[in-house]
Amino acid sequence: MRPVSLALALLLAGPIPAHASVPSFDIEASMRAYVVSVPVQVPACARAEAEGRGAADDRVSGNGWLIGSILLPIVAFGALASNPVPNSTLLMGRSDEEAACFSEGYRQQARGKVRQKALIGGLIGFALGFAVLSGANE
C-alpha cells in the first residue's frame, strides 16, 4: 500500500473510539534502563588544546588589528600571515606533547580572532576611504 493511500485510509476510518484501550509506554523509564554511567577519559592533547583555545580567547583581543586595518586597510592582509604564539609562561609545567597541543589550540583561536577583527577593520577602512574620496570629488 502506498503511504498516501494508507494515510487516506486512516483519515477515512475516523477517530479511535473512546472505549478502545491503547497501551501506554513510558519512554523515560525505558531510557533510564539503558543509560550507563561511564567515566569519559579526555585525551591529554585534546584537553591541552581546549585550554589553549581558552587562553587565546582570554588574552587575544585583536583590537590592534582592528584599529590598524581601519587606519590603513592594507594592514588587513597582514592578518593572513600572522602566526600568534602563546607566552612562554603559559607553557611552563607542560610536557612537550601537551605544550605543542596547547600552542596549536592557542594559535587556531587567536588567528581566527585576529583575522575576523582585521577583516572588519579593513572593510570599515575601505568604506571610510571610499566615502571620503567620493565626497572630495563632488
Image (cartoon, rainbow, N blue to C red):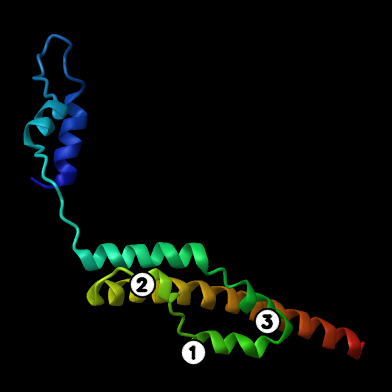
Mark 2 vs 3, N-terminal side: 3
Of badges 2 and 3, the one in the foreground is: 2
User: Label 1 near label 3: C-beta < 8 Å?
Assistant: no
User: Label 3 near label 2: C-beta < 8 Å?
Assistant: no
64 or 115: nearer the viewer: 64
> Which quarter of the image is occupied by the C terminus?
bottom right
Distance in Å between CA atoms under marks 1 and 2 = 23 Å
Q: Judge the density around disc 2: few (<14), some (14-19), many (≥20) Cα neighbours within 10 Å.
A: some
Residue at the disc numbered 2? 91
Rendering coords of residue 16 (x, y %): 17, 19
Identify the amino acid type marked 3: Gly
Query: Residue 10 falls in which quadrant of the image?
Result: top left
Secondary structure beneath label 1: helix
Query: Residue 79 falls in which quadrant of the image?
Result: bottom right
- Residue that lies at the very extreme toward the right in this rendered image: 138
Identify the amino acid type marked 1: Ala
Which mark is on residue 12? none
Which mark is on residue 81? 1
Secondary structure beneath label 3: helix
Asked whether, in this view, residue 15 is left or right of residue 100, the answer is left
Asked whether, in this view, residue 15 is left or right of residue 25, the answer is right
Q: Judge the density around disc 1: few (<14), some (14-19), many (≥20) Cα neighbours within 10 Å.
A: few
Distance in Å between CA atoms under marks 3 and 1 = 15 Å
Which mark is on residue 68? 3
